[in-house]
Image (cartoon, grey):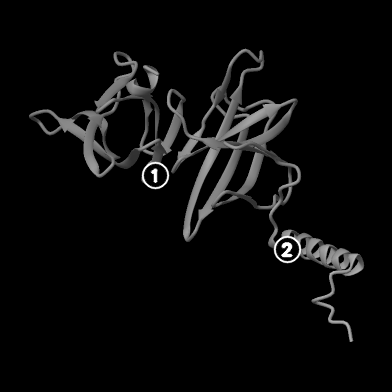
Amino acid sequence: MTNFFNDKSPLRMEVSKNTVLIILLVFIHCTGFAQSENSMTNSSIRIPLKKGKKPSTLYEKLIIEPTNLFIQSKPIKNNSPHVQLELNVVENSTKYNTFLWYYEESSGNKKVNYPKAYQNYSFSLEMNKKKVNLVVEKLDFEKTMFIDVGQTAVIGNLEILFKDCIRESSEDINGNQTDAFNSYNVLLAENGEHKTVSFISLDKLVDKELIIEWKNYKILILEDSEKALKLIVNNSLQQKR
């Protein structure tokens, strides 16, 4: 009697290959991950977004779940986004929920994106011939990003934690409120060294940006709010190369 598992004939080998292929196709279908339409490189992935139910995408260790895609051709308000996406990112047992926006003036001259930073990834929206893509790429220096409160961005060996935002106010001698502002705490870390940086809301009439310098890093705070900080990180060592 011929042992099927030990038989190395071309027929048996072909049957085995087909069986493995079928199992892989069934696995991909059952897990709900969509990869075929995605454009992937070593450092980024573009996920086409469509109306209706959007399958999850597995990228490295992340499970990416885009949901509630909202598109309006003509925003109701001037500062309203053209595109809004609710996004869930799952890594092991940790889940990150956020919103992404994309705005474009009717003239097409001004385009504003709001890339969100999570760990060492950046999530943003891209418009391409009226099609919307979710772009996931590795964080890098000299690129604009938004960090949600409570989240950490990792660029190289540098970790930036937007720890908290505290609403504060000042009063005159009569107890009347004279000013209201936010107080921010940001934790910086690299190779076991830590530094906590505190600052108050930017004065938009005076300050264009706030510069935080630590080690060889220069962190530019461009905008602030209770929910997110907009910033750019420069590395002087990298610039010298």
The structure residue drawn at horizontal position 70% and vertical position 58%, both measured from the top left corner, is 32
Where in the figure is residue 167, as x and y percent of width and height? 27, 38
Q: Nearer the viewer, residue 114 or 103?
A: 114
Q: Residue at x 36, y 38 (%)?
A: 157
Residue type, numbered disc 1: Gln
Name which residue lies at 49% across and 59% down.
92
In the displayed structure, 184 sits above or below 9; it is above
Mark 2 neighbour class, 10 Å CA radius: few under 14, some 14 to 19, many 20 or more: few
The residue at the far left in this view is 173
For label 1, the residue is: 151
* SS category of the residue bearing label 1: loop
Which image quadrant: the N terminus?
bottom right
Closer to viewer: mark 1 or mark 2: 2
> Which residue corresponds to mark 2?
27
Numbered mark located on residue 92 in the image: none
Hey, which residue is sitting farthest bottom in the picture?
1
Q: Amino acid at mark 2?
A: Phe
Say above or below: 103 vs 44: above
Quadrant of the frame with the C terminus? top left
CA distance separating discs 1 and 2: 33 Å
Give the x, y percent position of residue 4. Answer: 84, 78
Earlier along the polypeptide chain: callout 1 or callout 2?
2
Q: Is residue 114 left or right of residue 38?
A: left
Choose between 153 and 169: the one closer to the eye.
153
Q: Position of residue 79 (x, y in %)?
A: 54, 24
Dot 2 lies on which element?
Answer: helix
